[in-house]
Amino acid sequence: MAAGFGHAGNALLTVQEMYAADAAAIEQGIAGTTLMENAGRTVAEAIMERWSPRPTVVLCGPGNNGGDGFVVARLLKERGWPVRLVSLVPIGQFKGDARHHADLWTGEVEMPEAGIGDAALIVDALFGAGLTRDVDGAARSLLEDSEGRDIVAIDVPSGVHGDTGQVLGYAAQAALTVTFFRRKPGHLLLPGRVRCAEVVVTDIGIPKSVLEGIDPQQIENGPELWAESLHWPNPTDHKYARGHSLVVGGAIMTGAARMSAKAAQRAGAGAVTVAAPADAQTVYKVTLESIMVASYRDTSSLQDIIEMPKVSAVLIGPGTGMVTATRERACMVLRTGKPAVVDADAISIFEGSSELLFESVNGPVVMTPHEGEFARVFPDLQGGRLFRARAAAARSGCIVLLKGYDTVIAAPDGRVAINANAPADLATAGAGDVLSGIIVALLSQGLPPFEAACAGAWIHAESAMAFGPGLIPEDVIAGIPAVLSTLKSRR
């Protein structure tokens, strides 16, 4: 595990790490009742900033999340809001800090059968991020009846697991989610990310210093993680000083490699070469004006090209085909020890022989599977995306970038970044080829593989976001310079 990795404001805490943060704050002399008061106050403030007084129901569960709900109900009532409080259990069953705040509530405590009534605003304080069982019974009925109204979730929408983003049984759609100190992975991972809607992180008095003892290994991907590693040209640079990216092309699906090569060029590689099969070199030469083309006849002649000293990093997979030669050439690329990106066919071809892929790794490697490709080489890994990507990275010795709306980038040492700036428009054929091209360019420029993968995912998504609807892969390529210009201006 990398010490100090998750100490920034964009660190993500697992459920257990959040419990540890609360405990560390209490050990430092901050009373649990104070933390709960502060939590409820920040939720009430977020509500009053967004809505005018209206009939409101606060739904309280039996634990600390319910205790937060009692604070919210009391503070809204003190400000003149028409508030009802519905609890899953009688006050006598609350314990500790939650019981303290339940006793401060001066209104009626209604039982679930009282229902939602005519409430326009619902505060979901039923269950927090650590729920381990499906939402059912009275809790589910209350949440189902709340759908279609404005719902404010405390910590997470009840039913969303804080570590995985998975829905346990049922989770209502929130309009606002208020969480405390730091977000959790489930706020960024699907489907929890959608259920949470707007997420506000509030300060409840936990000192930032507690992160040093927790040392979280999850973070939201962003420039603060890798911007200092980016290479910007200086007056003494020549083209090869800026990195030489080699893209291995296929004989039939030539468009994939060509898009990867163009993306690498736009992402800052000083030189880009496509290694093309001899019988397909003409189509590459005719369609790539400022990108070099080197032809190869077989794996041996391809290796000669790759091992040229000027080649900085290699991409293999886009359009290479599901053929034996792709497996052979991917292993060869990895055994050279040069920084490499393995994508598409060069992943899928190892279905049933994934150990051969892993055994060939002899240098920095970024693997960029989507869910289908991931399942072919890691068929036994089940569970949440964060867990699976982390386990796959440890097993393979590669940086694993598990693509999706909630892309997860994992390193063998346990570090994980979740990308959260991608638009849904990126779900289009060819977008992955562009992403792998950006990453190989960054590797060529000397970025470490984890930083290259994180930077590539963020730049790729940011370019797509700037374009909007109607996006095709070529639009992402065209938008890369504007993203890089913005990054450069922020140095």
Image (cartoon, helix red, strand yellow):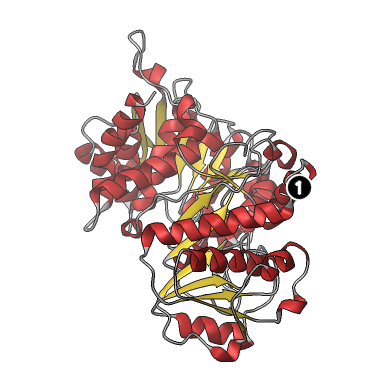
Image vertical order of residue 305 relative to residue 74, above or below: above
Q: In the displayed structure, would residue 402 be above or below residue 129?
A: above
Residue 73 x/y as whole percent: 55, 69
Q: Residue at x 24, y 29 (%)?
A: 290
The residue that appears at 66% across and 52% down in the rendered structure is 35
Quadrant in the picture for residue 147: bottom left
- Element type at marker 1? helix
Which residue appears farthest toward the top when viewing the image?
236
Instruction: State the image quarter where residue 383 is shown.
Output: bottom right
Marker count (numbered): 1
Camera-side residue: 374 or 27? 27
* 28 sits left or right of 5 in the view: right
**Spot occupied by residue 301 in the image (x, y as percentages of width and height):** 46, 34
Q: Nearer the viewer, residue 409 or 68?
A: 68
In the image, taking residue 452 as reference, residue 162 lies left or right, namely: right
Percent coordinates x, y for residue 49 in the rendering:
39, 57
Neighbourhood count class around disc 1 (C-alpha, 10 Å): few under 14, some 14–19, many 20 upward: some
Relative side of 18 to 57, left or right:
right
Q: Quadrant of the C terminus?
A: top left
Q: Is residue 409 above or below residue 147?
A: above
Asked whether residue 250 is in view, the answer is: no
Residue at the disc numbered 1 = 26
Expressed as whole percent of the image width and height from the top left, the position of residue 236 reads 36, 8
| Quarter in which the N terminus is drawn | top right
User: Which is nearer the eye, 360 or 269?
Assistant: 269
- Residue farthest bottom in this picture: 113
Q: In the shown orientation, is residue 358 left or right of residue 427? A: right
Q: Amino acid at mark 1?
A: Ile
Is any part of residue 94 visible from this angle? yes
